[in-house]
Image (cartoon, coloured by chain):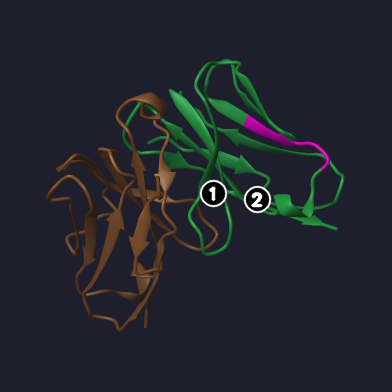
């Protein structure tokens, strides 16, 4: 069990550019979550997948944000036309459907820190 | 909309002191998690409570879920500098799906 991994760990981009982040969940975890965390705040939910199906999206996820999990394994989060307000830590978490997943226990990756200049 | 209010927001104490962090809501949660997060890293799960009135202990940390499953507390006995970090509570309304997080408590334990 290697844990949830995220790539890249840090991303600096200019306003208006597109960025894509990748998340690899714990193997056999069929649920995958994206959250966003700004300085001094707790994480805020963005979206949730069960296998390849995107089951829930937050109103925080504007049209510039898109997330995919095409094969039910890794997931990508793309932000188009980045804005300075998008600067945040983007966290990915995964959860099994059974066992600890029945208590909604989510295991987080190290995050991707995005800075938009 | 489920909201979790954590208090205090900041806590600065000396090594050896005890402390309690509170997490309150007007919503009922099916489960509540406590996480600890270090700068530049993701949250690390400490404990999950699911039953009203449940008490769980993890070494010097004691977690309690309120009887009505709307609130929780984290008590640390004899705090150590290694306990320094951001403590987050998070609740789930169902057994899957999004977690709602509190804004966190930044704990600093001075040697």
Q: Earlier in the sequence, mark 2 or mark 1?
A: 2
Q: Which mark is residue A13?
A: none
- Is residue B27 in view? no
Place of residue B31 in the rendered image (x, y in percent of width and height, measured from the top left):
46, 26
Residue farthest to the left, as pictured: A70
Q: Is residue B57 left or right of residue A75?
A: right
State which quadrant residue B52 falls in: top right
Percent from the top left, x then y, of residue B79?
80, 45
User: Which element is circle 2 on?
Assistant: loop
What is chain A's hue in the picture?
brown
The quadrant in which residue B92 appears is top left
Is residue B47 toward the left or the right of residue B22 in the image? left
Question: Does the magenta portion include A56?
Answer: no
Q: Secondary structure at mark 1?
A: loop
Tell me the colour chain B is drawn in.
green
Q: Chain of mark 1?
A: B
Look at the image and give the residue range highlighted in magenta: B73-78
Q: Please name the residue that numbered disc 1 is placed on.
A: B103
Is residue A19 rendered to the left or right of residue A3? Answer: left
Residue at x 34% of width, y 43% of height: A94
Which secondary structure type mostly characterizes the magenta part of the structure?
A: strand
Compared across the picture, whether B76 is left or right of A111 comes to right
Q: Please tell me which residue is depicted at 57% across the width and 33% down the height of the picture.
A: B24
Q: CA distance from mark 2 to mark 1?
A: 8 Å
């Amino acid at each position: 069990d290697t844990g949830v991994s995220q790539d890249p760990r840090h991303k600096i981009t200019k306003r208006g550019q597109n960025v894509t982040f990748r998340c690899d969940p714990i193997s056999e975890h069929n649920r995958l979550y994206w959250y966003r965390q700004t300085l001094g705040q707790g994480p805020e939910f963005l979206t949730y997948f069960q296998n390849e199906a995107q089951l829930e999206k937050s109103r925080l996820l504007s049209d510039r944000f898109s997330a995919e999990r095409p094969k039910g394994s890794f997931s990508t989060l793309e932000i188009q036309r980045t804005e300075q307000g998008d600067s945040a830590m983007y966290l990915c978490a995964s959860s099994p459907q059974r066992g600890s997943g029945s208590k909604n226990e989510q295991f987080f990756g190290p995050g991707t820190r995005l800075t938009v200049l | 909309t489920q909201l979790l209010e954590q208090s205090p927001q900041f806590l600065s104490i000396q090594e050896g002191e005890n402390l309690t962090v509170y997490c309150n809501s007007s919503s009922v949660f099916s489960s509540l998690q406590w996480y600890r997060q270090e700068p530049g890293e993701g949250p690390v799960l400490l404990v999950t409570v699911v039953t009203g009135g449940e008490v769980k202990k993890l070494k010097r940390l004691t977690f309690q879920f309120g009887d009505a499953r709307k609130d929780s507390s984290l008590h640390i006995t004899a705090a150590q500098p290694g306990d320094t970090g951001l403590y987050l509570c998070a609740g789930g309304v169902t057994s899957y799906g999004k977690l709602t997080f509190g804004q966190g408590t930044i704990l600093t334990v001075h040697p």
